[in-house]
Amino acid sequence: MSTSMSMSMSTSTSQKPRNRSVHLGAMTCLGLLSGLVLVSGCAPRVSCRLEKFSFKEADARYHNQTLRVMKRVLKSGSTAVDVGSFKGNVLAQMVDVAPQGTHYAFEPIPKMAAVVRKRFPSPRIKVHEMALGDHAGFATFQHVTTNPAYSGLKRRGLPRKNEVVVPIKVRVDTLDNVLPTTAKVAFLKIDVEGGEYGVLQGAVKTVRRCRPVIVVEFGASALKYGVSAEKMYRMLTETLGLKVNLMSCWLRGEPALTLAQFLGQYKAGRNWYYIAYP
């Protein structure tokens, strides 16, 4: 789900029927040469085969990459934040990697928040039934009951004509307001179907104070909130002082994406999960 102040379900747990091609090396394709693709994104120029993946396959890759990132970043007692928890699959990974840590989950749909609370009864897991954004208050949330991954404060284009949308009233707040100032966040995951920029706006103090590694979804749905790729890049790099990369490239220790490379990734639509780091 998404909202410019919103959060939604975790991409890694929802079945979003989007058909997008994802390059095996998770990089932007630039040209075709002798049956091979000349690609760029996280390394100078690499020749790779062009392989197409369904959204489900790409989603599994992102889920796996997120886990690998957490294993590098989190220690047993580290604190992590899951914005857009849905059923809590990414939260489960956080708990597995950092079992002695205190973790925070945010999910605005009442039924889903209840699922997460039941799944994680430990007092170390703080589940908040709310959307995160750039201000505090209440808002009308477009709950797509037939396809929850498309829910949010902004109604997105829906994959089927017969989707059922039920408006619900949800609480909205900022991460800076909700999170204790004593919390030392090491890892932050944001998957809110287009509203990621708003979540970051409401988390500036926390990010500047804690300097966490952030895994964030970002794609064309952000346009529903008036956020361009350049605006997101500048939020991450200039406002928050972080570097931006693809998770696959970061895991290999390759250089961060320049603005031009980030825009290339966005325009190609081949990747919609990124990592931001100090």
Image (tube, rainbow, N blue to C red):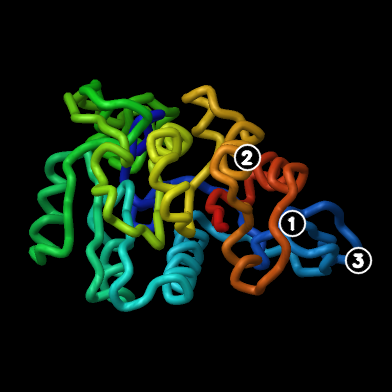
Q: Which residue type does callout 3 highlight? A: Ser
Residue at position x 48%, y 25% in the image: 224
Labels in figure, total: 3
Residue under the point 33% across and 61% down: 80
Mark 3 lies on residue:
34
**Quadrant placement of the C terminus:** bottom right
Q: Amino acid at mark 1?
A: Gly
Q: Earlier along the polypeptide chain: callout 3 or callout 1?
A: 3
Residue 155, image x, y percentages = 37, 25
Q: Which quadrant holds the N terminus?
A: top left
Give the number of the mark in front: 3 or 1: 1
Q: Which quadrant would residue 115 be assigned to in this image?
A: bottom left
Q: Position of residue 107 (x, y in %)?
A: 23, 44
- Residue underneath mark 2: 238
Disc 3 from disc 1: Cα separation = 20 Å
Residue 201 or 165: which is nearer the viewer? 201
Looking at the image, residue 7 sits to the left or right of residue 193; the answer is left
Mark 3, secondary structure of its residue? loop
Which residue is identified by label 1? 41
